[in-house]
Each structure stands twice: as C-alpha cells, then as structure tokens.
Image: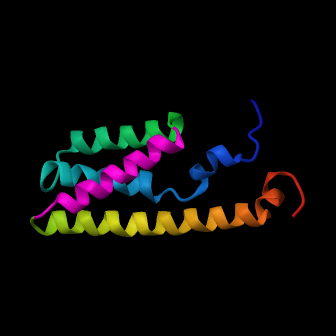
Amino acid sequence: MTPVGPLGARHAWLSLTPEPERELPEAIATLRAGGPPPAELVERECARAERLVTHGSRRQWRAYLAEAVALARAAEGDAALAEARAAIDDILENHDNLALGLARRRRRGTTKRFNGGSA
C-alpha cells in the first residue's frame, strides 16, 4: 500500500469539508426534479459528486458549486424547493468561508507545518 502524504496546494480544496459532496446531491436532485426527487436522480447526483471528488479538478468542482448556486437561484416553488435552496446556500457559505481561511493560511505560510516543513 502506497503511503498517502499531505495534500499539495493543487489538491487543497479536497480538505475543506465533506458536507458539499454529502448534502448537495440531494438538494440538487430536488431542484432538478422540482420537488422531492426519485431515488435514481439522487443516486446519479451522488455518483457525480463522488466522481468530481475522486477524479475531478478544482475547476470542475467549482463549476459544480456554481451550477448548484444557479439552480438554487432559479428555483421557485414549494417547501421542498425552499429547503433545498436554503441547504445549498448554507453549505456553500460554509465552504466559501473555509476556502478563504485556507487561502489566508497559505499566504501566511502556515501550511508549511502541515506539509512537512516548519512554520
């Protein structure tokens, strides 16, 4: 088994938080379906998120998040859609705040201690 080392700057986005890939698929499926989604649509969205995390790039991940925002902004309707919109807003606000914190750490050089160097 190959040892796994610390993530470099190119893959730092993977270390932010697991909530987007856990919670966005159902919210996105709800918005796409216009209400409670069928299980197969949720499964498809989960598989898509998993592919992005395991094989995608930061650019592809950010495009996925932007798509979620666009779906949320365009959706109008019942309580299920309102809940999905609120979930997307909350998840992405948290994600963005964590990304800002990571960027600040990188600028200050404090990520060196996590990557085998000294701070």
Q: Could you tell me which quadrant the C terminus lies in?
A: bottom right
Question: At x 74% / y 47%, what residue is drawn?
Answer: 6
Q: Is residue 2 above or below residue 78?
A: above
33 horizontally vs 107: left or right: left
The quadrant where residue 15 appears: bottom right
Question: At x 79% / y 57%, what residue is drawn?
Answer: 114
Q: Is residue 100 above or below residue 68?
A: below
Furthest residue toward right:
118
Inspect the magenta stretch and tell me whether residue 61 lies in it.
yes
Magenta stretch in the rendered image: 57-76
Of the pair 46 and 69, the residue shown nearer to us: 69
Of the pair 53 and 66, the residue shown nearer to us: 66
Q: What is the count of numbered marks?
A: 0
Question: At x 31% / y 58%, what residue is drawn?
Answer: 69
17 horizontally vs 51: left or right: right
14 horizontally vs 9: left or right: left
Question: At x 15% / y 55%, what residue is drawn?
Answer: 36
Q: Could you tell me which quadrant the N terminus lies in?
A: top right
- Give how far across and how far down residue 76 sits, in percent: 12, 64
- Give how far across and how far down residue 10 sits, in percent: 64, 44
Q: Main secondary structure of the magenta part?
A: helix
Inspect the magenta stretch and tell me whether residue 63 lies in it.
yes
48 horizontally vs 32: left or right: right
